[in-house]
Amino acid sequence: MAPWTAANISDLTGRTALVTGANSGLGFETAKALAERGASVILACRDATRCDAAAQRIRQAVPPAQLEQLLLDLSDLDSVRAFADEVGTRHGTLDILVNNAGVMAPPTRLTTKQGFELQFGTNHLGHFALTGLLLPSLMRAAGSRIVTVSSFAHEAGQIDFDDLQRERAYTPYGAYSASKLANLLFMLELDRRLRAADAGTISVGAHPGFANTNLQAAGPFLGTKPLLSWFVLGGVRLMGQSAAQGAEPQLYAATAPGVEGGDYYGPKSRFRGHAAPSTMAPQARDEDAGVRLWDVSERLTGVDMDEAIAP
Ligand SMILES: NC(=O)c1ccc[n+]([C@@H]2O[C@H](COP(=O)([O-])OP(=O)(O)OC[C@H]3O[C@@H](n4cnc5c(N)ncnc54)[C@H](OP(=O)(O)O)[C@@H]3O)[C@@H](O)[C@H]2O)c1
């Protein structure tokens, strides 16, 4: 059977999708593919110029694309709230949310506006809060989907609940892996709660394998020489699959028929290839850790997700 590609996505006319980190890499390709199939796409980006440039590139490829550009900084919970309010005002329903944006492995411990370790705060807490605040719109849309993007790096992830903000021990990739593990613990806990509430919305996970994007140059070289980051990007370009192919698992999770809550998709051959079911590490399936992370995330963000799930 021919592999699934973005060309298999069915007509999405009349559906609204929101993609975080839509100006670059996987988020850009995801937004473009959804727009190509007729969805109205909200590009959530933290920088207006980069957002405009991405919208222009999508419109060049897909002239009838229906796009909205809205600013969202996931490392600032005030920005997340303002953004979610704006989306809620403009859209009564939301069919697809792709929690895609991410930052990887800055060399030193950085913090979000509210003082959380940057990767945990952006990759997990920012998306946790965003999802909770958008849940009313998502739950009003029949068959809506929330896709959270993780990484094979989650397999090395460990969450230290006594040092969640990595104040005692920061390592760049240790914090990144933990944030990607948090993405999956959240995705599965959300799935369990949506099922318990008999909701029509599903929570699904995806990862791109190893894809040629800006990720490997952006975080690890924050504050260092651009020349070095270009050198690394050159290496990534040689080894990684295209961003378009890397985006296939999250597009599959967001649109393919037969996808169920709690599913996890990635490239067929671990780091590259077309979308296929993927395997989570045992620590991602730890239900106690899922509940504990949920509770602490509600406390840290001030977003009461349970209230939105159980009307
Ligand atoms: N590429 C890979 O091989 C790979 C592998 C495993 C998992 N992933 C995951 O894939 C996802 C997408 O990454 P990518 O590879 O496409 O990298 P990318 O090209 O660097 O894109 C990351 C996106 O996230 C945005 N972002 C970063 N911090 C943000 C913040 N505070 N608020 C809002 N947006 C923010 C970036 O915005 P700016 O452009 O403004 O910085 C950019 O749009 C991430 O979750 C990553 O962990 C990627």
Image (cartoon, grey):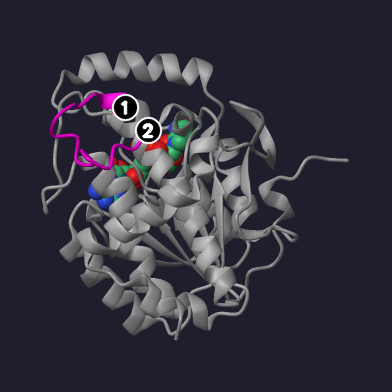
Residue at image position (60%, 51%) is 251
Residue at image position (16%, 18%) is 225
**Which one is nearer the viewer's eye here, 137 or 197?**
197
Q: Regarding ligand 1, which quadrant of the image does it lie in?
A: top left
Residue 161 located within the stretch drawn in magenta:
yes
> What is the crowding at mark 2: few (fewer than 14 residues within 10 Å), some, or many (at least 20)?
some
Is residue 284 found left or right of 165 in the rendered image? Answer: right
Q: Which residue was labeled with disc 1?
A: 174
Whether residue 60 appears in this view of the structure is no
Q: Which residue was labeled with disc 2?
A: 158
- Magenta segment main secondary structure: loop
Quadrant in which the C terminus is drawn: bottom left
**Which one is nearer the viewer's eye here, 102 or 212?**
102
Q: Are marks 1 and 2 in contact (CB under 8 Å)?
A: yes
17 w.r.t. 139: above or below: above
1 or 2: mark nearer the eye: 2
**Residue 55 point in image, percent of width and height:** 39, 56
Element type at mark 2: loop
Q: Which residues are magenta?
A: 158-174
